[in-house]
Amino acid sequence: MKQKNISKNRIKLDLRYNQLMEQAYNLRQTDHAMSDVSEFRALKTLNKLNRLEFLARGESSQPIS
């Protein structure tokens, strides 16, 4: 059950990260401030994604007791 939730959250965060990075790229030429905000949010999302992947890796390596 936990593995399903982790996978679902991973997909959701990955999609959100890609959307924010695309938005930052598109805004780069017109609005630098909004581009920076979008990129900052994308980096925060990437950090969450990396933490989730780290936790998922720890989940799968633990022995079943």
Image (cartoon, rainbow, N blue to C red):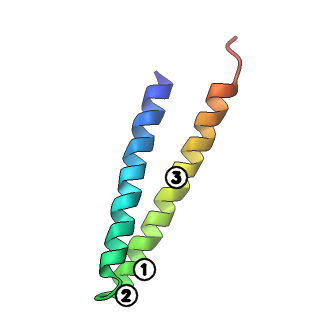
Taking the image as shown, residue 20 lies to the left or right of residue 58, namely left
- The answer to whether marks 1 and 3 mark residues whose Cβ atoms lie closer than 8 Å is no
What numbered label is drawn on residue 48?
3
The answer for how far apart the CA atoms under marks 1 and 2 are is 6 Å
In what element is the residue under mark 1?
helix
- Inter-mark Cα distance, 1 to 3: 18 Å
Evaluate if marks 1 and 2 touch, with contact meaning CB atoms under 8 Å apart: yes
Residue at 37 percent of width and 45 percent of height:
12
Up-down: is 64 above or below 6?
above
The residue wearing badge 2 is 32
- Residue extending farthest to the top is 65
User: Which badge, 2 or 3, is on the more N-terminal residue?
Assistant: 2
Residue located beneath label 1 in the image: 36
* Count of numbered circles on the image: 3
Name the spot of residue 53 as percent of width and height, x first: 57, 42
User: What kind of residue is marked 1?
Assistant: Asp
Numbered disc 2: secondary structure:
helix
Q: Residues within 10 Å of mark 1 (few under 14, many from 20)?
A: some
Q: CA distance from mark 2 to mark 3?
A: 24 Å
Vertical position of residue 54 compared to residue 44: above or below: above
Which residue type does callout 2 highlight? His
Quadrant containing the C terminus is top right
